[in-house]
Amino acid sequence: MIAWLLTHAASTRFAVVAGVFAVLLVLQLRMPRRGDHSAPGRYVRNLSLPLISAAIVYLLLPLTLVGLATLLAERQLGLFNLLDWPPLIELAITIIVFDLAIYWQHRAMHELPWLWRLHRLHHTDLDFELTLGLRFHPFEILFSLLCKALVIAALGAAPLAVLCCEILLAAFALFSHADIRIAKRWDQVLRRFVITPDWHRVHHSVHRAETDSNYGNLLSIWDRLFGSATEQPRDGHLGMRLGLDEFRDEASQRLRGMLMQPFLDATTPTGKNDKPHA
Ligand SMILES: [Zn+2]
């Protein structure tokens, strides 16, 4: 079974994440939080980005992350390949370390100008709903894969643990961007441990202090621990504006403008430019 899953890692991951997407889509349609619904073209553009990224990754990278973990296991490289710890302990540590690394990767993308250029596209969306969880520039996807590869190499993470991490993190990237109404008392319980849509929506606010907070992907502890947590948006969840003031024009929202984001200088009426968004 495990061997079959690892042989079909890409299709397994796609099937599970597509299933999560379908469930969240139904929930979003049945119980929307804000009802962020824009032109149909936005959905097509957001959904086309992961396809473009997948093609570029397939052409440029010689190995998948699971493939890298398999190679490291065969050659007995990396921490866990030198130790003999129970697989479940290794899995738990792999998930926690992956999530911590992604927290700092995300934070660095807001604080370093050249990385902000790669990440900025994700923040130009004027809506907050499910497909925003897929709206990443191919360059950001490549950079993120390289960061994850470093974590896998250091840990010597097991191939199955890597597959679990990829699925879990992708599922939470979708969940945290879904426009789903969760009862306040449940949101309060959930956000003690994990990122909820209400928690992450703050990160997409037009207000810079809010954008530069709530970086977490899966666990909310990192934002609390490293002082970047904002519990609620100052304008309220229903009243808050989303996106970046620099890129609200139609051209920025077209696919060409989206793909050109890393090369654009953000000159704005307010005088902001492409300085670090911190
Ligand atoms: Zn961000």
Image: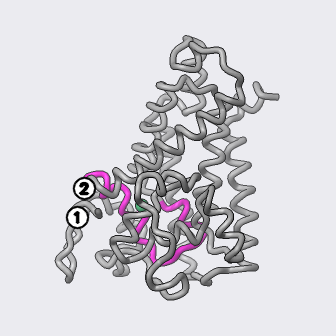
Q: Quadrant of the N terminus?
A: top right
- Is residue 251 in sight in this rendering? no
In magenta, the rendered stretch is 113-135
267 is higher (above) or lower (below) than 189: below
Q: Secondary structure at mark 1?
A: loop
Residue at horizontal 57 percent and vertical 81 percent from the top = 36
Asked whether disc 1 touches disc 2, contact meaning CB atoms under 8 Å apart, the reply is yes
Q: How many marks?
A: 2
Residue 105 shown in magenta: no
Image location (x, y in percent) of residue 179: 62, 74
Q: Amino acid at mark 2?
A: Pro
Residue position for label 2: 113
Which circle's residue, 1 or 2, is located before the other in the chain?
2
Image location (x, y in percent) of residue 54: 53, 47
238 is higher (above) or lower (below) than 183: below
Q: Residue farthest to the bottom? A: 239
Q: Which disc number belongs to residue 243?
A: none
Image location (x, y in percent) of residue 66: 60, 31
- Is residue 224 in sight in this rendering? yes
Residue position for label 1: 274
Residue at horizontal 71 percent and vertical 34 percent from the top = 8
Residue at horizontal 70 percent and vertical 41 percent from the top = 11
Q: Residue farthest to the left? A: 271
Q: Quadrant of residue 256?
A: bottom left
Q: Secondary structure at mark 2?
A: helix
Query: Quarter containing ligand 1?
Result: bottom left
Image location (x, y in percent) of residue 262: 30, 58
